[in-house]
Amino acid sequence: MKKNLSLILAIAMLLSLSVFVPSFAEEVYKNDGWVVSVNSEISPKLGIEKVFDGDYDTMWHTKYTAEGSTITHKDAPPYIINVDFGKGLEIGAIRYVPRQAASGESSAGNWEEAVFYGSVNGTDFEEIGKESYNISSNRESVTTNVKKGVYKAIKISVNKGRGGFGSAAEVEFLGSGVVVKEDKPKTVLEDKTSWTIEASSVIREGLHMRAFDGDAATYWHSNYTHENGVVTWKESPPYYITVTFPENVLISGFTYLPRQDAASGRFDKAELYASETLDGELIKIKDWALDASAGLKTAEFVSNLNVRKFQIKIVQSAGVGTAAEFDFLPAKEGAETISISDYVKYEEETKLYPISKDGFSIESDVPFWLGYNAGNIIDDSAQTFWQTEGISVAPSPWEFTIDMKKERRISAFSYTPRNTNDMHGAWKAYEVEVSKDGENFECIHTEYEWKPSLEIRTVKFETPVTARYVKFSVIEANASRAACADITFYQTKAEFDAENTMEAEKYVLKIGDKTIKVTKGEKTYDKKMDVAPFIDAASSSTLIPLRGLLEEMGAEITWKGESEEITVVTKSGRIEMQIQNNLVYVENPKYGMVRYTLPVVPKIKNSRTFIPLRFVSEHLGYKVSWNGETQEITIEK
């Protein structure tokens, strides 16, 4: 179902595309003519009106003056924000959203202390709440429960801000329907002071605790020595971080925030272990592969786990080991709790499996920036990306369609943003449509409230869908252009196994024998060739007749007699060769035609054309193995 995208965009802007999702029911009041004022603002562009405009990308900042990089004056707190609603609104909580600076940019003005006052008549105020803020990342918001009541006006006194300034992206008033959280003791997951945390390698005693201090600017670092700024020794991985809880807790995942100021020590391979008892064996529950970006990494479990001890084993890292933060996801409500000893088997049966993008193609009519075309979306690399031109050249919606070449049953997709701290092109609003024929599309998923992020996000569909074509329409993105490093589709184990069984191919050839033993899915049969394969004495390479095996693989073969040129085309690629020429051209989805040098040239023998078996098979996506005793070659996919 194709939507009116301009209408969607308008709605999305009104909703401000916030992704700060509270853990309780709420109604956020919208500014419908409020009278607002403040005792300090640097300019109308950064005025107090920006705090109530529903746009997280704008901000208010207090007044200061500077000469070059030197601050010569700044207004001192308290900064008094006045809001007159013009009518009574029932308010139960107030949310502060800090300025949305990208990683590494200023957090000046982030609130540290504030007091809230409410007025029933707009004139007389009483204190209704206060908050001390400890914001470690500008991606955080803080919601303060206040004395619930019907107020005509609210006054906020910001008594302390970072750096002696005041700033804010938004202040939101939460109204009727708010469930005010009651004060209650912290759970063991929140009270990290009760955990016992050990590290196998640390540069200085106790500094491994920085990975659990809630501050993204500090980090754990593995041990090393240096002299005059030159590293003389460093402890190599694996590194072990072990957490023991004072009592058993239910967790549903584990998170890792890489060091934010540099890539050094970020790790890309780890193993997760857990035990249900204090002295029990630590059982491996997950092999964890990660990308090199600075974004938060989440290992989400397919069930809850009852854990007393947990360990991360960092297997491979960038020279040393570092981490800004490690943390755990609390139990999922309604999810099963599986014993640790049964977890691996349970995950194997219930997790989603990535669908190979072998043979996929992608189309997009949107002008792209420099060489960053849509083909990068399906190249299985988080380091390459697609990015559109600016909105003046390429206005939204920005669309691309992935052709999976056949109908598949898909349950989810993952989106990897462009790996850059300025988050250019990170999606805010989009829709997903599917089609079986490439003409008739049906909308199956929409999202209008994504906040730009470096995280890889996995989106599960409400119900699995069967489709060949998947179209993405990016309605709004950061910096008024769209970008994407990777899209991967997922299916259940049953669908994955069924597809792999149905698609499995195996061919067994024997030197001097004209018979190919063929296995396709559950079918097995013999295929006769005109001539048998042989081994070229000069190169020890196996040569096979042009026709026979390739036709069984579904290849399209073209022969040009005058030039003696051979073209082989399958859904996996294209190969161009020539008799007695050791140069061969192979089509690469990303780089186009790539030239290689063959170990043995194609040749004509006894009026039959022969080509090198291993090179051709491997470049069409097959694995080739050789049994010297039986003189058999096995080709599998």
Image (cartoon, rainbow, N blue to C red):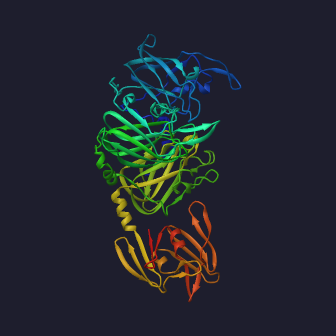
**x%, y% of residue 628?**
46, 76
Q: Residue at x 35, y 43 (%)?
A: 274
Q: Say which quarter of the image contains residue 225.
A: top right
Q: Quadrant of the C terminus?
A: bottom left
Residue 449 seen in render: no
**Which residue is situated farthest in the bottom direction here?**
606
Of 180 and 308, nearer the camera is: 308
Of 470 and 585, nearer the camera is: 585
Residue 409 seen in render: yes
**Which residue is situated farthest in the top direction here?**
124
**Which residue is situated farthest in the right direction here?**
68
Q: Say which quarter of the image contains residue 46.
A: top right
Residue 493 falls left or right of residue 398: left
Of 383 and 309, nearer the camera is: 309
**x%, y% of residue 471?**
48, 54
**x%, y% of residue 276?**
30, 41
Using the image, determine if residue 168 lies above or below residue 446: above
Q: Say which quarter of the image contains residue 153.
A: top left
Residue 458 falls left or right of residue 480: left
**x%, y% of residue 296?**
48, 40
Residue 339 falls left or right of residue 578: left
> Total label count?
0
Using the image, determine if residue 127 lies above or below residue 608: above
